[in-house]
Amino acid sequence: MAKEKEKNQEQKTETVKVQNKNKKVVSYNKWGIIFLLPFVIVYLVFQLIPLVSTIVYSFFEYYDDGLDMVGPNFKAFGNYIKLFANKDLFVYAGNTLIMWIMGFIPQIIISLLLAAWFSDPRLRLKAAGFFKTVIYLPNLIMASAFAMLFFTLFSKTGPVNSILMDLGLFSEEYAFLDHEWSTRGLVAFMNFLMWFGNTTILLMAGMMGIDPALFEAAEVDGATSTQVFFRISLPLLRPILVYVLITSLIGGLQMFDVPQILTKGTGNPLMGSNLTTMTLIMNLNRHLSVSKNYGMAGTLSVLLFIITAILSFIVFKVSTRKD
């Protein structure tokens, strides 16, 4: 009997301990939920609800007609049919893609070179920390402020024209912002300057994470620096490169402030063909601020979301395929 009483007492004690542990877990979970609530609330209010409302608006006719608002009238896929029937949509998409490619290709090349130099201990670069800070600084400047700076520098009476004329390279002032390809080049160059520092830091972090023993073994085997870069560094950087490519692609599709300021919101250099620097987001802004066509703006937003998702998936699959 005494043994049975002792066993029962031990069981009761263990049960109480388990209950106390469960209470502690519940109390910890409660605090976790409390700390997550601000993020959930902000996400619901500023992201999820606007996303759902944008998708809903894309199926409605809803625009400003003078003093009156037309709609919202349900049109099913009418907005999408109207959007694709407009040939200018493909022109805007082409403009966006051209300016993104012009900025991204030099960005990734320069960033790879700088990352390789800064992460190579054999070079023993002096003041590396200072130069890393300097190349990252443009990323901290607002794109609108950067665009205003370039607008002033490359205007007809700006310092760039003055320097070129003083050097004898130009006999007269050149209107950089009045020609198609010079304007596109400035937009691409600005995007390159603003983002190559961030890309360099990311790639450098990836290179510093590679096991140094791999480089030492390659040196012992007589591999050159070029072979080490293309056979070791580049393949092992694939996840970081995929991330950079996807985020840059998404940023390129959202290109707005730089061409908006350089072309004074028109997307059209004065001496170029019509709307040669008009991007998809600039067109979206037209629907929101000029015509106040919320239905078409929602349709274009959904289209951009789908394009971003598809391209990101394709890039990810191609870049992560097994050799």
Image (cartoon, grey):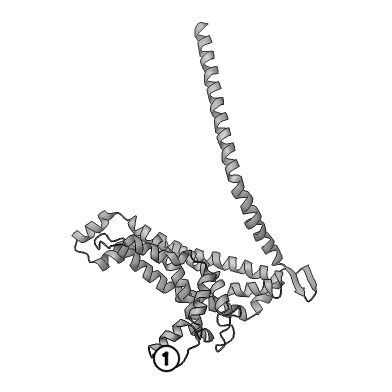
Q: Which residue is mark 1?
A: 170
User: Toward the viewer: 66 or 55?
Assistant: 66
How many numbered discs, if any? 1
The image quadrant of residue 256 is: bottom right
Kindly give the residue lying farthest to the top in the view shown.
1
The kind of residue on which mark 1 rests is Phe
Q: Position of residue 71 (x, y in %)?
A: 78, 69
Residue drawn at (42%, 89%) of the image: 165
Q: Position of residue 309 (x, y in %)?
A: 55, 64
In the image: residue 322, left or right of residue 46 = left
- Is residue 144 visible to the viewer in this orientation of the structure? yes
Q: Position of residue 17 (x, y in %)?
A: 53, 23
User: Toward the viewer: 185 or 15?
Assistant: 185
* Vertical side of 38 occupied by 66: above or below: below
Q: Position of residue 61 (x, y in %)?
A: 75, 70
Circle 1 Cα neighbour tier, 10 Å, few/some/many (<14 / 14–19 / ≥20):
few
Name the element at disc 1: loop
The quadrant of the rendering that contains the C terminus is bottom left
Kindly give the residue lying farthest to the bottom in the view shown.
171
* Vertical side of 142 occupied by 85: above or below: below
Kindly give the residue lying farthest to the right in the view shown.
68
Residue drawn at (71%, 69%) of the image: 295
In the image: residue 265, left or right of residue 292 = left
The image quadrant of residue 56 is: bottom right
The image quadrant of residue 130 is: bottom left
- Is residue 101 visible to the viewer in this orientation of the structure? no
* Vertical side of 188 occupied by 163: above or below: below
